[in-house]
Image (cartoon, rainbow, N blue to C red):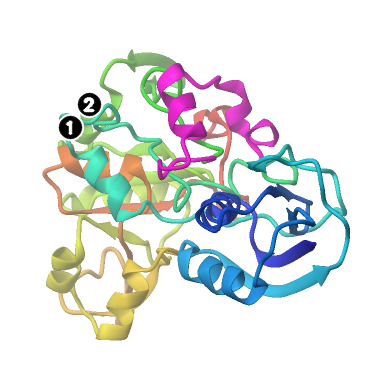
């Protein structure tokens, strides 16, 4: 028997979920990505109530996974002594790629735990969260088809990746301080860019922002212009420098309590702010913020959605920052270092 799943099944921890359910039911066979779908093969001699299997699978899926259709084929499957995750097949191509998903609570706990090996590691993620769309280069979604292919897993990450009991089991973008990417802080003086901190760059960046500097932060999908909302003159400077005299700026707040201090917020709006999509939500202003949202009754606010944001707020004294796309009027958001250097 083969079962074909379609929907949001790539890059969302779907295969690890299938694996765990199959092992719990003592099923022999395989699971693999097929570009536009996930295929599960179950050996012919396995007696299975597929209704129970599907129910258990739906109950165990990560929040971000969605099954839109299930196709059951009576194809023969044999030759498996266990249940395995096999290398992805080519299959049919698809336009679907998994979305970036806000850092989950478990990863936030690890990020802020001084005893955890990923303490303050800005690229922390697991099967339930992290960058996907921003890193993927081709489908099916596997590490070798993402920007993370450049970073070979260390032994500890490899052990987590291969452990069915670990929540990073087959997390394709897994990394840590030993084997993953790192930030570097540059300083611009008359357009001459120099490295000023590659040891503790986020802490230094936070200090400069608190002191009234304007910076550019590279995130999952591109560059953001950053300054503290405590420094009115810097906000005005951004308007003058980037040709945005009236455009409202998005504000990132440390937490929901800070949001409540500057905006009126309903339960539904709070739910949206906290969701895994972590959108910018238009809220009614409760404080005088004309320099940020001139002449408008609303302000766009969002919460930290990646590890680097949580690390940044760990060091910032400011409770809210301007976090707006780094681009000149009429141009796309900067995504490469050289693009940011030219702003």
When the figure is inspected, residue 242 is found, relative to residue 159, above or below; the finding is below
Residue located 16% across and 29% down the image? 115
Is disc 2 in contact with disc 1, using a CB cutoff of under 8 Å?
A: yes
Q: Nearer the viewer, residue 343 or 8?
A: 8
Q: Secondary structure at mark 1?
A: helix
Bin the neighbour count of mark 2 within 10 Å (Cα to Cα): few under 14, some 14-19, many 20 and up.
some
Q: Give the x, y percent position of residue 338.
A: 57, 27
Q: CA distance from mark 2 to mark 1?
A: 5 Å
Nearest the eye: 54 or 316 = 54
Specify the segment rendered in magenta. Answer: 142-170
Q: Is residue 70 above or below residue 98?
A: below
Q: Say if residue 58 shows up in the picture.
A: yes
Vertically, is 311 above or below 127? Answer: above
Q: Does 300 sit above or below residue 303?
A: below
Front residue of 277 and 37: 37
Query: Is 55 on the left-hand or right-hand side of 31?
Result: left
Q: Position of residue 250 (x, y in %)?
A: 36, 62
- The N terminus: image quadrant: bottom right
Does residue 129 appear to the left or right of 303 in the view shown?
right
Residue 207 numbered tag: 1
Q: Position of residue 196 (x, y in %)?
A: 32, 15
x and y percent of residue 286 in the render?
17, 79
Residue toward you, 198 or 46? 46
Residue linked to disc 2 = 204
Q: Is residue 295 visible?
A: no
């Amino acid at each position: 028997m083969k079962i074909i799943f379609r929907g949001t099944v790539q890059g969302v921890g779907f295969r690890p979920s299938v694996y765990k359910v199959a092992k719990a039911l003592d099923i022999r066979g395989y699971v693999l990505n097929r570009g536009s779908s996930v295929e599960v093969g179950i050996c012919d001699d396995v007696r299975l109530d597929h209704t129970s299997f599907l129910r258990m699978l739906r109950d165990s899926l990560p929040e971000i996974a969605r099954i839109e259709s299930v196709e059951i084929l009576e194809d023969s499957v044999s030759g498996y002594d266990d249940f395995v995750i096999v290398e992805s097949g080519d299959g049919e191509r698809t336009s679907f790629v998994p979305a970036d998903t806000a850092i989950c609570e478990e990863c936030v706990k690890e990020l802020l735990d001084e005893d955890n090996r990923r303490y303050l590691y800005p690229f922390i993620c697991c099967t339930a969260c992290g960058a996907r769309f921003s890193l993927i280069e081709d489908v099916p979604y596997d590490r070798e088809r993402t920007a993370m292919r450049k970073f070979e897993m260390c032994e500890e990450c490899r052990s987590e990746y291969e452990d069915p009991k670990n929540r990073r089991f087959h997390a394709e973008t897994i990394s840590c301080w030993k084997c993953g990417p790192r930030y570097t802080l540059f300083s611009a003086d008359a357009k001459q860019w120099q490295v000023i901190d590659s040891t503790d760059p986020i802490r230094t960046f936070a200090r400069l922002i608190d002191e009234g500097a304007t910076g550019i932060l590279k995130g999952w999908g591109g560059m953001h212009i950053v300054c503290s909302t405590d420094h009115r003159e810097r906000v005005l400077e951004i308007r003058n420098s980037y040709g945005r005299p009236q455009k409202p700026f998005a504000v990132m707040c440390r937490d929901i309590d800070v949001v409540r201090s500057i905006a009126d917020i309903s339960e539904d709006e709070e739910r949206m702010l906290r969701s895994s999509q972590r959108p910018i939500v238009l809220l009614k202003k409760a404080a005088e913020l004309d320099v940020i949202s001139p002449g408008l009754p609303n302000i766009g606010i969002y919460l930290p959605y990646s590890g680097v944001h949580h690390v940044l707020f760990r060091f910032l004294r400011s409770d809210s920052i301007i976090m707006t796309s780094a681009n000149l009027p009429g141009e796309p958001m900067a995504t490469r270092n050289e693009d940011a250097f030219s702003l």
